[in-house]
Image: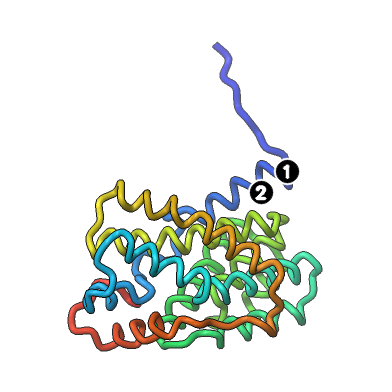
Amino acid sequence: MASTTMTLATGTPAEALLRLLAWCSPAYPVGGFSYSHGIEAAVEAELCNGREALLAYVQSALRAGAGAVDGPLLAAAHRAAEARDDATLDAAAELGAAMRGTAELALESLQQGGSFASVTGTAWPHPGFAAFAARHPGRMAHAVAFGAAAGFHAIPLDAALMGYLSGFAANLVSAGVRLIPLGQTDAQRVTAALMPAIAAATRHATITPLADIGTATPMLDWLSMAHETQYTRLFRS
């Protein structure tokens, strides 16, 4: 019986989707599993002790925290990569490396960005992305690296934003499952309830210029700083 093999033409929407799914997979080796974005400190302080509290925490991060910064950064990097505008791409990289409120949030972003750039540059090489990564060793935020790679590889901006922000939210939910702890069904209820916030963060990212980005989550920043000296820790942030 003859076997059949499906092949995808290079540059097709289906190929772009498969590439995006790979980059957003929990199996993609960027080390996201080791960061809680301050949730570990929130659990220790009894400020995040159940499903509704975890939902509120992740919603805040998406709407007014890292999501409100990383979304526009990703969009700017994507557009610059598409246009082959190195000056704007480099400006996004410099801003992304600076826009972190605490040392641990900076580590969370820059370590994952460096890992993403290294793995993606090896598995899905592109000369434009390779040159960009070489100009910013150790100083590339995850969102900027992701946006630039998506732009160079012709992944649509809306899809790239939705995928990145969904992955960010999923990683925080996963941390909450382990720390609170929560059951898997409750975790999926939180994930489902986060869909409107992810869609809103995606829309915000497409219309917000870099000059207008910022955060308004002082409690999340405080928890991140508290985590730096927390006595018992499972996570790096």
What residue sits 50% from the left and 54% below the top? 195
Left or right: 160 as drawn, with respect to 61: right
**Residue 221 position in % (x across, y down):** 40, 84
> Residue 186 placed where, x, y %?
31, 51
Residue 48 at x, y = what percent? 28, 70
Q: Amino acid at mark 2?
A: Ala
Q: Quadrant of the N terminus?
A: top right
Q: Residue at x 25, y 88 (%)?
A: 229
Residue pointed to by mark 1: 12
Amino acid carrying label 1: it is Thr
- Label 2–label 1 contact, CB within 8 A: yes
Q: Which residue is at the front of the view, 117 or 78?
A: 78
The tag on residue 16 is 2
Q: Residues within 10 Å of mark 1 (few under 14, many from 20)?
A: few
Q: Quadrant of the C terminus?
A: bottom left
Q: Is residue 4 above or below residue 105?
A: above
